[in-house]
Amino acid sequence: MKVMAQMAMVMNLDKCIGCHTCSVTCKQAWTNRSGTEYVWFNNVETRPGLGYPRGYENQDEWKGGWIRKADGRITLRAGGRFRKLATIFSNPKMPSLQDYYEPWTYDYDTLLNAPAQKNFPVARPYSIISGKPMNVSWSANWDDDLGGSKEHAVKDEMLKGIEDKVKFEFEQTFMFYLPRICEHCLNPSCAASCPSGAIYKRSEDGIVLVDQDRCRGWRMCISGCPYKKVYFNHKTGKAEKCTFCYPRIEVGLPTVCSETCVGRLRYIGLVLYDADQVLAAASVENDTDLYAAQRACFLDPADPEVRKAARAAGIPQDWIRAAQRSPVWKLINTYQVALPLHPEYRTMPMVWYIPPLSPVVDVIRDTGHDAEDAGNLFAAIEALRIPVEYLANLFTAGDVAPVEGVLRKLAAMRSYMRERTLGHEPGPAIAEAVGMSEEDLYEMFRLLAIAKYADRYVIPPAHAEQAHALEELATDCALDFDGGPGMGGLGAGSGPVGEGSGALTPVAVENFRMLKERQTADSLVPGGSKKGRVNLLNWDGKGMPDGLFPEGTSGARDGKDE
């Protein structure tokens, strides 16, 4: 048994309202510069829909992920070393810019500086790439709220096999939102595809990163990733991807997308797994067995033998304790309500999802029946095959049984808590119907519905910090030049998006820690005088700290709510 630690995320899709706040804040933090205008490390898709890039789930076309050969070994779907060598200068299996979308801005000068005239001027869109006028025909979420579904959603790869059951009439279809980031897989095909070895998986926490110094722009990683979450910076010639906000993770802060999520749908925690079992789990014969095989790789942090092996592997004691408190472990293994995205790709993804019960509840409510009744919900899950089969295509390689099991648990929790809230005695029957106890059902409700910040994000600080890399130095990045990843939007010709982002703001680890203390404090202003030294960059908007206004003015406050 080789114990390793992995930072993982679970998203509760029933709580996603499709506001795209996570996408925008991630964009501002990581890709608000020239060369990455089309890049979204985090994007929110409306499903059913084609996703981003368009049709990325069609692996017959894009050749991403792994396939199992007849002899039981797995190999890259796009081919091995010789295939890579033959196509290294011309990679045909890669989405074009049109499959993502051609980034655009608007001719604001015409709109703002036009002289007085009878007709109101129009700000025409023009391409950021070519600078020529264009018609907007695609974007990162063209299917937003099923807006383009009449024309495009029928091409959704997940509808294969159930097309005859689906009626794409706007009033009768179902819809939910699917936020996506890099999966930071246990068996990443992007890393295996890279000829220069620039993509690597950190041994301490499992985060998958791109070494910008080693990247040569072959773009094989883009083809190899089945989720298409590796992007090409067309200005620097380097590959870039989601970093799981590792500078924040290292000091115990959640990712930017999690921190700013309006619905509080994300959970981050540590998972212990047996590295010796990963290859065997990814090589199981049937795609429908991959979900159970991956779960079997995870180790119970409460097991004394696992803790002993973890300490022997060099995992710190506070990390082991964090793994015991991990909400991700509870949702995946204790309650078994979280599912992986497309396990059939055999990459062993580590961003999991709680499938939405909303499509089923909405149908019951619209028919005039009680949408909170356990019997109605259980019967509807069995009868409404369309959303269940669609979810199975997304999360369990088409196996309906695990999805049904998760939805039944969510339905039981919903009905059980309704009875408790109304002052009734629900009894154990509802919990027993889904193989749970009343205590487990209630604890699952607390975690999914009302868990506080410290319960949703159990992130132990790193123990291997490099002091120089965490210093507040503007000269730390060797690629901080015009055209480099650290350019911060500076330099001539940096483009409309990059120019607006300004220079990099150096942030020391101490500032991260102060921000965390501020965000998790019970009071609005921590102890100590703040007079004359208010740092607005670290202010999170909670209340009005001392020193924000001069004393004696009407705006002066003591940090307390009125």
Image (spheres, grey):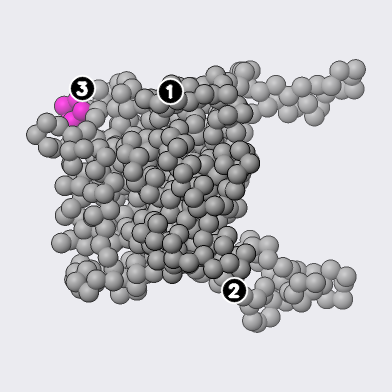
Q: Quadrant of residue 289?
A: top left
| Residue 86 visible, this orientation | yes
- Percent coordinates x, y for residue 354 in the rendering: 44, 49
Residue 98 counted in the magenta span:
no
Asked whether 489 or 358 is in front, the reply is 358
Amino acid residing under circle 3: Ala
Residue 86: mark: 3
Magenta-drawn segment: 79-83
Residue located 25% across and 28% down the image: 78
Outermost residue toward the left?
71
- In x, y percent, where is residue 188? 28, 43
Foreground label between 2 and 3: 2
Give the prevailing secondary structure in the magenta stretch: helix
Q: Residue furthest bottom?
A: 528
Q: Say whether disc 2 or disc 3 marks the residue closer to the N-terminus.
A: 3
How far apart, in angstroms, are the residues tagged by discs 1 and 3? Answer: 38 Å
Compare marks 1 and 3 and give the one earlier in the sequence: 3
Identify the residue at horizontal 36%, vertical 55% (top origin): 336
Rendered image: mark on residue 521: 2
Q: Is residue 326 above or below residue 110?
A: below
Query: Would residue 254 appear left or right of 1 to someone viewing this image?
Result: right
Which residue occupies the foreground of this view, 13 or 313?
A: 13
Q: Position of residue 36 (x, y in %)?
A: 50, 36
Q: Which residue is mark 1?
A: 163
Residue at the location (33% across, 22% down)?
61
Write down the quadrant of residue 206 in the picture. Answer: bottom left
Residue 55 got which mark?
Answer: none
Query: Which tag is nearer the camera, tag 2 or tag 1?
Result: 1
Cα separation between marks 2 and 1: 51 Å
Label 3, secondary structure: give it.
Answer: helix
Residue 44 in view (yes/no):
no
Q: Tag 1, which secondary structure?
A: helix
